[in-house]
Image (cartoon, grey):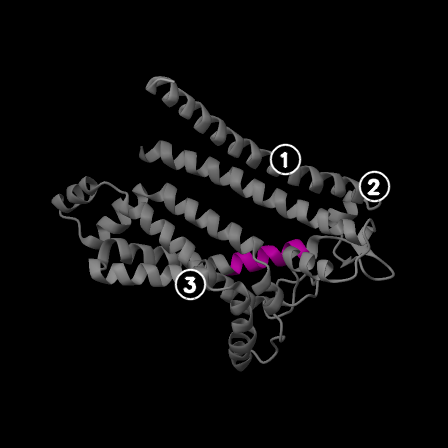
Amino acid sequence: MGFRARRNLQEKAIGFFLFACAALSTLVTVGIVFVLLSETLSFFREVSIVEFLTHTRWEPMFQEKHFGILPLAAGSIQIAAGAAVIALPAGLLTAVFLSEYAPRPLRAWLKPILEILAGIPTVVYGYFALTFVTPLLRVFFPETDIFNAASASIVVGIMIIPTVSSLSEDALRAVPEALREGAYGLGATKLEVSTRVVVPAALSGIVASFILAISRAIGETMAVTIAAGARPNLTWNPLESIQTMTAYIVQASLGDTPHGTVVYKTLFAVGMTLFVITLVMNVLSQWVLARFREEYE
């Protein structure tokens, strides 16, 4: 076999291998969606979808069962919103400092330290919230429950700061240096260059980091389960105990839930709801990113 024939064979083998990897990923995704959808449809044969989406009580394990997912959905949204309030501004300001202000040696130390935060096990954050954040909150707000949404939001916000800062800093550093030099040539200060030139030019990457961080906050499990508790409580008071969708999945999975029962099927119904919320967020983020790319390209 000649050199050209061997090279063509290698190229075909590599192409087939890459296609197989892509096909496997697609099949796994389709399989996950199929299992979720089939079990969810089976759940809705026993429970009204109107009750599931509109009722305000979630008590699937009681003798008198209620299947309103609003308390779980509200809990997930509350945690994600609270975490976003902490992480998005802190992460963006950190990224601007690292990109525009920090000396190179300092940046070389700070960015790896920030990324180490992302590698800390989430269960550690959960117990940090339970043993430090909650007692601190109770000093200022004595009525705070032991398990509460505020402490969970704080630690989840701390958890996702590295995601926002690292991805945003990469986007800011990707802005062409010519834009900065042009702004300085017009007499702009460093603050004006950072806020009026660099940040708008990197907005698509910054928005992507925000969306990714919020998606992680919605899907966070262990830290929220430990810090926020397991009471499906429809409330917007961050000092009270709540339960998120992921926390319920953990609670129900750890119990003796018989296969095929309606309680077992709630796992898939809640999981499907979480999947749909994440999918909608991703679609919206792609639409927003496309708008920003068209503006700054």
Q: Report x, y in % for residue 48.
A: 81, 44
Dividing the picture into quarters, in which one does residue 109 lie?
bottom left
Residue that label 1 marks: 30
Q: Position of residue 203 (x, y in %)?
A: 36, 43
Helix, strand or loop at label 1? It is helix
Q: Dot 2 surroundings within 10 Å: few (below 14), some, or many (20 or more)?
A: few
Residue 119 image position (x, y, % from top left) = 45, 61
Q: Which residues are magenta?
A: 72-82
Mark positioned earlier in the residue sequence (2 or 3): 2
Residue 202 magenta-drawn? no
Q: Residue at 73% across / 59% down in the picture?
A: 252
Q: Amino acid at mark 2?
A: Arg
Question: On screen, 24 above or below 263?
Answer: above
Residue to which mark 3 is pinned? 117
Examine the image and state in which quarter residue 86 appears.
Answer: bottom left
Residue 148 left/right relative to 118: right
In space, the residues marked 1 and 2 are separated at their CA atoms by 22 Å
Question: Tag 2, which secondary structure?
Answer: loop
